[in-house]
């Protein structure tokens, strides 16, 4: 069965530190890839998405992600985090043009001033 | 934000009682989904719908049923609530349309505000 792995369960950073959150998926065919963010007490919001084309995708709030097909990865990055980035981040994969998304278990990011 | 509302937003109920959660959209999207979110599990799909009266099971469908009699409404029912169904429930919608007539669908999902359900 397809799965999505987010190995970093809890990340703690100081403001201005660089961020990289890992996401790996298990599927060898066509994929659409997403990163969602959930701020405390709120619903999930889309950060960025990859469907095709340039594997380096830029999203909102300075986030970017790189799709590396050979590594089945779609890691999220931000060069300099802010306190307001404190949230939970979810990677999701839509495989083979199906109707469903498979979510990772999420990474909780805490940024301290 | 996409026009998605969920009701109720909070509910406390007792074991064995039936509970119905409602998701309402104003986007006329074809696909609607129900997820539950639990610590350490992320989001897990309960049921989804790909059109009026067309539904299918997700990975954690036991104990849940759904109905979609109108495009805009997707109901999730717990026939007899159990404590293991204490969770936060999110509805999501997706257009699922073929953007460039390539035969591909783009399953970007938009989420509702969630319903926090506590079963005592």
Image (cartoon, coloured by chain):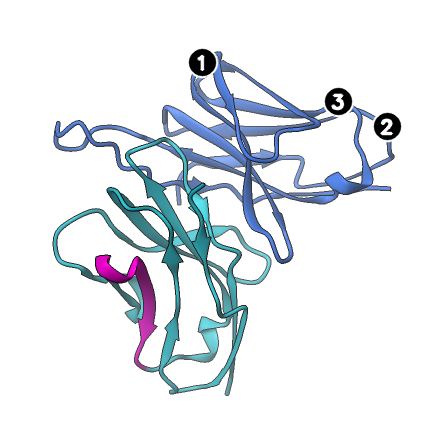
Residue A49, above or below A77: above
| Secondary structure found at label 1 | loop
- Could you say where residue B31 lies in the image, as x and y percent from the top left? 40, 27
| Secondary structure found at label 3 | loop
Predominant SS of the magenta segment: strand
Q: CA distance from mark 2 to mark 1?
A: 29 Å
The earlier-in-sequence mark between 2 and 1 is: 2
Pick the residue in front: A79 or A60: A79
Badges 2 and 3: C-beta atoms under 8 Å apart? no
Chain to which mark 2 belongs: B
Question: Which label was assigned to residue B16?
Answer: 2
Verify whether residue A87 appears in magenta. no
Q: Is residue A58 left or right of residue A86?
A: left
| Secondary structure found at label 2 | loop
Q: CA distance from mark 2 to mark 3?
A: 8 Å
Which residue is at 34% across, 42% downward? A94
Q: Is residue B66 left or right of residue A54?
A: right
Q: Residues within 10 Å of mark 3 (few under 14, many from 20)?
A: some
The residue wearing badge 3 is B79
Which residue is at 53% across, 31% downward? B58
Which residue is at 55% across, 30% downward? B23
* Magenta extent: A67-79
Chain to which mark 3 belongs: B
């Amino acid at each position: 069965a397809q799965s999505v792995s987010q190995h970093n369960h809890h990340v703690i950073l100081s403001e201005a530190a660089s961020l990289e959150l890992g996401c790996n998926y298990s599927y060898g065919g066509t994929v659409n890839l997403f990163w969602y963010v959930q701020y405390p007490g709120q619903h999930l919001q889309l950060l960025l998405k990859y469907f095709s084309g340039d594997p380096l995708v830029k999203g909102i709030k300075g986030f970017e992600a790189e799709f590396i097909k050979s590594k089945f990865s779609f890691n999220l990055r931000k060069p300099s985090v802010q306190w307001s980035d404190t949230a939970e981040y979810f990677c999701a994969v839509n495989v083979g043009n199906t109707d469903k998304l498979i979510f990772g278990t999420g990474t909780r990011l805490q940024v301290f001033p | 934000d996409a026009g998605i509302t969920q009701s109720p937003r909070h509910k406390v109920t007792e074991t064995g009682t039936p509970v119905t959660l409602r998701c309402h959209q104003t986007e006329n999207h074809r696909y609607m989904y129900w997820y539950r979110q639990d610590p350490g599990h992320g989001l897990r799909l309960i049921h989804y719908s790909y059109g009026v009266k067309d539904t299918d099971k997700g990975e954690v469908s036991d104990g849940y049923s759904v109905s979609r009699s109108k495009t805009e409404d997707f109901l999730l029912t717990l026939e007899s609530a159990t404590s293991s169904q204490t969770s936060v429930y999110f509805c999501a919608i997706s257009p699922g349309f073929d953007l460039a007539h390539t035969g591909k669908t783009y399953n970007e999902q938009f989420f509702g505000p969630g319903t926090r359900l506590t079963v005592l």
